[in-house]
Amino acid sequence: MDIDFNAAYPIYEQVIDEIKKEIVRGELNSGDKLPSQRKLARKIEVNPNTVQRAYREMEQRGLVETKRGRGTFIKDDDQVMVEIKKEMAETAVLNFIEEMISLGFEKENILKKVESNLKRREDNE
């Protein structure tokens, strides 16, 4: 997990985003058990209350479910997985577009850059 302790973005939200990224990459799947709050807190070197807040937020958002005495699990709901992937893709594309525009690129140049890089990637596979 990649947590930026100096960012204005709250750490618990970064934890949520990192777990979503693991879902999108296929590292976590529906029904998978998340690490205990204390274990994850030690791993990423944050206060356990921060992880607790992230888990609570994810549960309220319908991403995970907590089973008393068993732990916290990725919700076993294919629609939730589809929504997470769509949300993460949309965020990545919007961030990319905003960054390119801030660098002075116009729509046509952005599209050309994307197409040429996709082509280059295909050629290298």
Image (cartoon, rainbow, N blue to C red):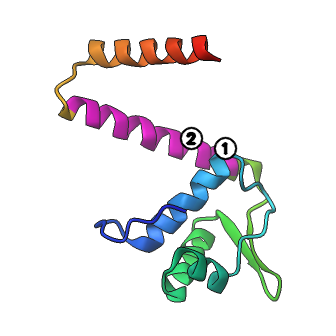
Find out whether the residues at labels 2 and 1 contact each other: C-beta distance under 8 Å: yes
As drawn, the residue found furthest toward the front would be 124
Chief secondary structure of the magenta portion: helix
Q: Secondary structure at mark 1?
A: helix
> Which residue is depicted at the point 53% across and 65% down?
16
Frontmost residue, 11 versus 119 = 119
**Circle 1 is placed at which residue position?**
82
Q: Secondary structure at mark 2?
A: helix
**Circle 2 is placed at which residue position?**
86
Compared to 118, does 19 lie above or below?
below
Q: Is residue 48 magenta?
A: no
**x%, y% of residue 117?**
45, 18
**In the rendered structure, which amino acid carries the disc numbered 2?**
Lys
Compared to 85, does 123 lie above or below?
above
**In the rendered structure, which amino acid carries the disc numbered 1?**
Val
Q: Is residue 92 magenta?
A: yes
Tell me the quarter of the image containing the N terminus: bottom right
> Which residue is depicted at the point 46% across and 73% down?
12
**x%, y% of residue 111?**
36, 15
Residues at marks 2 and 1, CA–CA distance in whole angstroms: 6 Å
In the image, taking residue 26 as reference, residue 10 lies left or right, namely left
Tell me the quarter of the image containing the C terminus: top right
Which residues are the magenta region? Answer: 81-101
Residue 10, which numbered label?
none
As drawn, the residue found furthest toward the left would be 104
Frontmost residue, 56 versus 21 = 21
> Which residue is depicted at the point 22% across and 19% down?
106
Q: Residues within 10 Å of mark 2 (few under 14, many from 20)?
A: few
Compared to 95, does 113 lie above or below?
above
